[in-house]
Image (cartoon, rainbow, N blue to C red):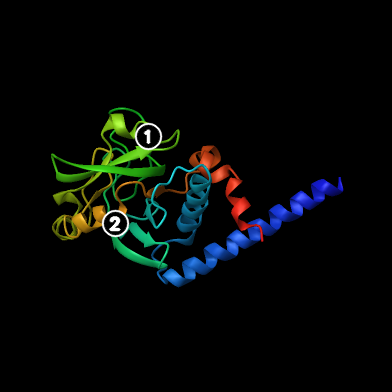
Amino acid sequence: YSDLLEVDSIRLEAKSNFSDYVSDLYAELGDTSLLFAAFEKAMTGYHNLDKFQKIRRKDIITVIDFSKPSNQECLFIIDLCDRKILHKSVVAHGVNSGGLYATKFSNDQNSHQSSLGFYLTSSTYSGKYDLALRLEGLEYSNSHANSRGVVMHAAKYATYEFLESNGGVLGRSYGCPAMPYTHFHQVVEWIKEGTCLYIYHPSRSYAKNSRYLNRVNYLEDFIW
Protein backbone atom coordinates (compact mmCIF):
# COMPACT_ATOMS: atom_id res chain seq x y z
CA TYR A 1 0.00 0.00 0.00
CA SER A 2 2.81 2.38 0.85
CA ASP A 3 4.41 1.62 -2.52
CA LEU A 4 1.17 2.60 -4.28
CA LEU A 5 1.06 5.85 -2.34
CA GLU A 6 4.63 6.58 -3.37
CA VAL A 7 3.83 5.90 -7.04
CA ASP A 8 0.80 8.21 -6.83
CA SER A 9 2.91 10.88 -5.16
CA ILE A 10 5.58 10.67 -7.86
CA ARG A 11 2.94 10.87 -10.60
CA LEU A 12 1.29 13.90 -8.99
CA GLU A 13 4.66 15.62 -8.73
CA ALA A 14 5.43 14.82 -12.37
CA LYS A 15 2.06 16.26 -13.43
CA SER A 16 2.81 19.39 -11.46
CA ASN A 17 6.25 19.68 -13.06
CA PHE A 18 4.74 19.26 -16.51
CA SER A 19 2.07 21.85 -15.78
CA ASP A 20 4.73 24.33 -14.65
CA TYR A 21 6.81 23.62 -17.76
CA VAL A 22 3.86 24.19 -20.11
CA SER A 23 2.75 27.35 -18.29
CA ASP A 24 6.27 28.81 -18.37
CA LEU A 25 6.70 28.00 -22.06
CA TYR A 26 3.31 29.50 -22.90
CA ALA A 27 4.21 32.67 -21.00
CA GLU A 28 7.48 32.95 -22.93
CA LEU A 29 5.64 32.69 -26.25
CA GLY A 30 3.77 35.81 -25.20
CA ASP A 31 0.76 35.49 -27.50
CA THR A 32 -2.66 34.84 -26.00
CA SER A 33 -4.23 34.51 -29.45
CA LEU A 34 -2.88 30.97 -29.12
CA LEU A 35 -5.34 29.55 -26.60
CA PHE A 36 -3.71 27.90 -23.61
CA ALA A 37 -6.09 24.92 -23.74
CA ALA A 38 -5.00 24.14 -27.31
CA PHE A 39 -1.33 24.61 -26.46
CA GLU A 40 -1.48 22.44 -23.33
CA LYS A 41 -3.08 19.53 -25.18
CA ALA A 42 -0.64 19.95 -28.05
CA MET A 43 2.30 19.65 -25.66
CA THR A 44 0.79 16.64 -23.88
CA GLY A 45 0.45 14.77 -27.15
CA TYR A 46 3.82 15.97 -28.39
CA HIS A 47 5.63 14.50 -25.38
CA ASN A 48 3.68 11.24 -25.58
CA LEU A 49 4.57 10.98 -29.27
CA ASP A 50 8.18 11.61 -28.36
CA LYS A 51 8.09 8.76 -25.83
CA PHE A 52 6.88 6.45 -28.60
CA GLN A 53 9.61 7.77 -30.92
CA LYS A 54 7.09 9.02 -33.47
CA ILE A 55 8.61 12.48 -33.95
CA ARG A 56 11.64 12.78 -36.20
CA ARG A 57 12.18 16.54 -35.77
CA LYS A 58 11.58 17.74 -32.24
CA ASP A 59 12.34 21.44 -32.67
CA ILE A 60 9.00 22.51 -34.14
CA ILE A 61 5.33 21.97 -33.33
CA THR A 62 2.39 23.32 -35.32
CA VAL A 63 -0.94 23.96 -33.61
CA ILE A 64 -4.17 24.56 -35.56
CA ASP A 65 -7.01 25.73 -33.33
CA PHE A 66 -10.39 25.05 -34.90
CA SER A 67 -12.24 26.35 -31.85
CA LYS A 68 -11.61 29.81 -33.29
CA PRO A 69 -13.51 31.29 -36.26
CA SER A 70 -11.74 30.90 -39.57
CA ASN A 71 -11.45 34.66 -40.06
CA GLN A 72 -8.96 34.73 -37.18
CA GLU A 73 -5.42 33.40 -37.14
CA CYS A 74 -5.77 29.76 -36.12
CA LEU A 75 -2.41 28.28 -37.16
CA PHE A 76 0.70 28.70 -35.03
CA ILE A 77 4.20 27.40 -35.80
CA ILE A 78 6.24 27.21 -32.60
CA ASP A 79 9.99 26.89 -32.23
CA LEU A 80 10.38 24.85 -29.05
CA CYS A 81 14.13 25.40 -28.87
CA ASP A 82 14.06 29.19 -29.09
CA ARG A 83 10.65 29.33 -27.38
CA LYS A 84 8.96 31.63 -29.87
CA ILE A 85 6.17 31.66 -32.41
CA LEU A 86 7.72 31.64 -35.87
CA HIS A 87 4.53 32.22 -37.83
CA LYS A 88 0.76 32.44 -37.51
CA SER A 89 -1.97 32.71 -40.11
CA VAL A 90 -5.53 31.94 -41.06
CA VAL A 91 -6.21 28.37 -42.17
CA ALA A 92 -9.21 26.87 -43.95
CA HIS A 93 -11.24 23.95 -42.63
CA GLY A 94 -13.33 21.43 -44.54
CA VAL A 95 -16.44 22.62 -46.40
CA ASN A 96 -18.63 20.13 -44.53
CA SER A 97 -17.09 20.94 -41.16
CA GLY A 98 -18.97 24.22 -40.87
CA GLY A 99 -19.13 27.81 -42.01
CA LEU A 100 -17.32 30.44 -39.98
CA TYR A 101 -16.69 27.87 -37.26
CA ALA A 102 -15.68 24.24 -37.72
CA THR A 103 -18.06 22.07 -35.69
CA LYS A 104 -18.07 18.69 -37.45
CA PHE A 105 -15.08 16.42 -38.03
CA SER A 106 -14.59 13.12 -39.82
CA ASN A 107 -11.97 10.59 -40.87
CA ASP A 108 -14.23 9.17 -43.60
CA GLN A 109 -13.57 9.15 -47.33
CA ASN A 110 -15.39 11.89 -49.26
CA SER A 111 -16.63 13.52 -46.05
CA HIS A 112 -14.99 16.82 -47.02
CA GLN A 113 -14.53 17.46 -43.32
CA SER A 114 -11.42 18.26 -41.32
CA SER A 115 -9.92 15.62 -39.02
CA LEU A 116 -8.78 16.32 -35.47
CA GLY A 117 -5.69 15.08 -33.71
CA PHE A 118 -1.97 14.58 -34.11
CA TYR A 119 -0.17 14.33 -37.44
CA LEU A 120 3.40 13.88 -38.55
CA THR A 121 4.53 16.06 -41.44
CA SER A 122 6.09 14.19 -44.34
CA SER A 123 7.49 14.99 -47.78
CA THR A 124 6.53 17.64 -50.31
CA TYR A 125 5.25 17.36 -53.87
CA SER A 126 3.95 19.58 -56.64
CA GLY A 127 0.26 19.12 -57.41
CA LYS A 128 -2.99 20.96 -58.08
CA TYR A 129 -2.08 23.77 -55.70
CA ASP A 130 1.62 23.84 -56.62
CA LEU A 131 3.64 23.04 -53.48
CA ALA A 132 1.96 20.70 -50.99
CA LEU A 133 3.06 18.94 -47.80
CA ARG A 134 1.94 15.38 -47.05
CA LEU A 135 0.51 14.67 -43.60
CA GLU A 136 0.49 11.32 -41.81
CA GLY A 137 -2.47 10.89 -39.45
CA LEU A 138 -1.41 9.22 -36.21
CA GLU A 139 -4.77 8.61 -34.55
CA TYR A 140 -8.16 6.93 -35.01
CA SER A 141 -9.52 10.38 -35.85
CA ASN A 142 -7.21 11.08 -38.81
CA SER A 143 -5.72 7.72 -39.87
CA HIS A 144 -7.16 8.05 -43.40
CA ALA A 145 -5.45 11.37 -44.09
CA ASN A 146 -3.16 9.85 -46.70
CA SER A 147 -5.86 7.95 -48.61
CA ARG A 148 -8.17 10.98 -48.43
CA GLY A 149 -5.46 13.20 -49.89
CA VAL A 150 -5.44 15.49 -46.84
CA VAL A 151 -2.33 17.64 -47.22
CA MET A 152 -1.23 21.14 -46.32
CA HIS A 153 -1.32 23.50 -49.27
CA ALA A 154 -1.86 27.13 -50.16
CA ALA A 155 -5.07 28.30 -51.84
CA LYS A 156 -6.62 31.54 -53.09
CA TYR A 157 -9.70 30.96 -50.92
CA ALA A 158 -7.46 30.84 -47.81
CA THR A 159 -5.95 34.31 -48.07
CA TYR A 160 -6.48 37.58 -46.23
CA GLU A 161 -7.48 39.15 -49.56
CA PHE A 162 -10.25 36.56 -49.91
CA LEU A 163 -11.45 37.41 -46.41
CA GLU A 164 -11.79 41.08 -47.32
CA SER A 165 -13.60 40.41 -50.58
CA ASN A 166 -15.88 37.70 -49.15
CA GLY A 167 -17.45 39.56 -46.27
CA GLY A 168 -14.95 38.40 -43.66
CA VAL A 169 -15.54 34.69 -44.29
CA LEU A 170 -12.67 32.43 -45.34
CA GLY A 171 -13.14 29.85 -48.05
CA ARG A 172 -13.14 26.13 -47.24
CA SER A 173 -11.34 23.02 -48.45
CA TYR A 174 -12.20 19.34 -48.89
CA GLY A 175 -10.56 18.62 -45.53
CA CYS A 176 -7.06 19.99 -46.06
CA PRO A 177 -5.64 22.70 -43.80
CA ALA A 178 -5.24 25.30 -46.56
CA MET A 179 -3.21 28.47 -46.01
CA PRO A 180 -2.33 31.76 -47.72
CA TYR A 181 0.28 31.63 -50.49
CA THR A 182 2.30 34.35 -48.77
CA HIS A 183 5.17 32.75 -46.81
CA PHE A 184 3.87 29.25 -47.59
CA HIS A 185 7.21 28.01 -48.95
CA GLN A 186 8.88 29.17 -45.74
CA VAL A 187 6.18 27.46 -43.67
CA VAL A 188 6.87 24.18 -45.43
CA GLU A 189 10.61 24.53 -44.84
CA TRP A 190 9.98 25.07 -41.14
CA ILE A 191 7.70 22.09 -40.57
CA LYS A 192 8.38 19.41 -43.24
CA GLU A 193 10.01 16.01 -42.76
CA GLY A 194 8.84 14.78 -39.41
CA THR A 195 7.51 17.54 -37.14
CA CYS A 196 4.35 17.28 -35.03
CA LEU A 197 1.17 18.99 -36.18
CA TYR A 198 -1.91 19.09 -33.95
CA ILE A 199 -5.44 20.08 -34.95
CA TYR A 200 -7.39 21.12 -31.85
CA HIS A 201 -11.07 21.48 -31.07
CA PRO A 202 -12.75 21.12 -27.65
CA SER A 203 -14.50 17.96 -28.80
CA ARG A 204 -15.34 15.73 -25.83
CA SER A 205 -15.45 12.55 -27.89
CA TYR A 206 -12.03 13.19 -29.39
CA ALA A 207 -10.50 14.12 -26.02
CA LYS A 208 -11.91 10.94 -24.50
CA ASN A 209 -10.58 8.64 -27.22
CA SER A 210 -7.24 10.19 -28.19
CA ARG A 211 -4.43 7.84 -27.20
CA TYR A 212 -1.88 10.61 -27.17
CA LEU A 213 -3.90 12.86 -24.88
CA ASN A 214 -4.76 10.12 -22.41
CA ARG A 215 -1.55 8.14 -22.03
CA VAL A 216 0.74 9.20 -19.19
CA ASN A 217 4.05 7.95 -20.60
CA TYR A 218 5.19 11.54 -21.03
CA LEU A 219 5.31 12.00 -17.24
CA GLU A 220 8.46 9.85 -17.05
CA ASP A 221 10.39 12.84 -18.41
CA PHE A 222 9.05 15.16 -15.71
CA ILE A 223 10.20 13.27 -12.63
CA TRP A 224 12.99 15.15 -10.90
Please rate how many residues cluster around mark 2, counting C-alpha atoms within 10 Å: few if below 14, some from 14 to 19, many from 20. some
Q: Position of residue 177 (x, y in %)?
A: 28, 46
Q: Position of residue 110 (x, y in %)?
A: 27, 28
Nearest the eye: 160 or 147: 147
Left or right of 61? Residue 183 is left
Nearest the eye: 23 or 165: 23
In the figure, 62 relative to 125: above or below? below
In the figure, 99 relative to 31: above or below? above
Please rate how many residues cluster around mark 1, counting C-alpha atoms within 10 Å: few if below 14, some from 14 to 19, many from 20. some
Report which quarter residue 165 is drawn in. bottom left
How many numbered marks, from 0 up?
A: 2
Q: Which residue is mark 2?
A: 190
Query: Residue at left 30%, top 60%?
Result: 73
Q: Judging from the image, what secondary structure is the residue with disc 2 in?
A: helix
In the drawing, what numbered circle is on residue 161?
Answer: none
Nearest the eye: 138 or 170: 138
Q: Nearer the viewer, mark 2 or mark 1?
A: 2
Q: Position of residue 31 (x, y in %)?
A: 40, 69
Mark 2 residue type:
Trp
Query: Residue at left 17%, top 48%?
Result: 155
Q: Which residue is mark 1?
A: 106
Mark 1 residue type:
Ser
Nearest the eye: 199 or 2: 2
Q: Residue furthest right?
A: 1
Q: Position of residue 141 (x, y in %)?
A: 43, 35
Q: CA distance from mark 2 to mark 1?
A: 27 Å
